[in-house]
Image (tube, rainbow, N blue to C red):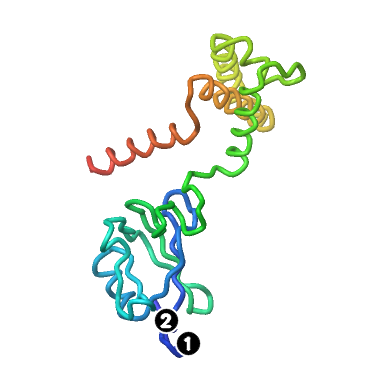
Amino acid sequence: MEINFDKYPNGLVPAIVQDAMTKNVLMLGFMNKEAYTKTLELEKVTFFSRSKGRLWTKGEETGNFLDLVSVKVDCDKDTLLIQANPQGPACHLGTATCWGEKNNANFGFLSYLEQVISDRKDNKELEASYVASLFRKGINKIAQKVGEEAVEVVIEAKDDNDLNFLNESADLLFHLMVLLQAKGFRIQDVEKTLKSRHKFDRDAE
């Protein structure tokens, strides 16, 4: 990998650290050639600390290491994107990121939809809300709807109408998200289960 450490007078390039799983940005540091080499050797993110005036492996005092997953360089070859698995808060203030944000998984529109479902769950008396009506009827009705939608998906899978299949798949996913919240869970909990199975499969290879 070609990195232009000579572009700036101090020989440092910005290194953006991103959680390899959630894709959230955790922090920004600076690397010189020695810090980059040390990062690869240790497989732990190492910066050049401008305040300390030396190489600094993130977590060397706290144990909150950033375990290296990958390194990419941008199109100008002067900025690094580091993907890592954090072993604790990334910020020295104790927060998950240096912007004070939580390092939660984000599933794009599904995360937005999940929040809408949560709001309807907390306001079951909303007469005009279909989701609120499901929560009013209770978990048995919600589970029944998941079963019905699953059958519809199977039926449409045997046909050649892709639009109908996608519509029924969307209905199934939506009602499953409602059921998850009725049971006190979120998509992230399912993700954790899938990740644990993936790890088991890799270890078994």
Above or below, 147 relative to 109? above
Which residue is located at x 35 percent, y 72 percent? 47
Instruction: Report the residue marked by disc 1.
Output: 8
Q: In this view, does 105 lie to the left or right of 124?
A: left
Q: In this view, does 20 lie above or below 111?
A: below
Query: Residue 203 placed where, x, y %?
Result: 23, 43
**Up-down relation of residue 95 to residue 13 (above or below):** above
Most distant residue in the right direction: 128
Number of numbered tags placed on the structure image = 2
Q: Do the residues labelled 2 and 1 touch (CB within 8 Å)?
A: yes
Q: Is mark 2 on a helix, strand or loop?
A: loop
Indicate the secondary structure of the residue bearing disc 1: loop
The structure residue drawn at horizontal position 47% and vertical position 27%, both measured from the top left corner, is 185
Q: Is residue 26 above or below residue 167?
A: below
Identified by mark 1, the residue type is Tyr
Quarter of the N terminus within the rendering: bottom left
The residue most toward the front is 93
Residue 113: percent from the left, percent from the top?
63, 34
Nearest to the observer: residue 146 or residue 12: 12
Using the numbered discs, state the Cα–Cα distance from disc 2 to disc 1 in whole angstroms: 7 Å
Nearest the viewer among 41 and 127 is 127
- Measuring from the top left, give residue 142's x and y in whole percent: 58, 15
Q: What residue is at 44 percent from the left and 32 percent from the top?
A: 190
Q: How busy is the neighbourhood of tag 1: few (under 14 within 10 Å), some, or many (20 plus)?
A: few
Q: Mark 2 points at which residue?
A: 12
* Side of 188 relative to 174 (left or right): left
Where is residue 16 shown, x and y percent of the image?
A: 46, 66
Using the rendered view, name the quadrant where residue 179 is placed: top right
* Residue kind at label 2, given as amino acid type: Leu
Res. 109 image quadrant: top right
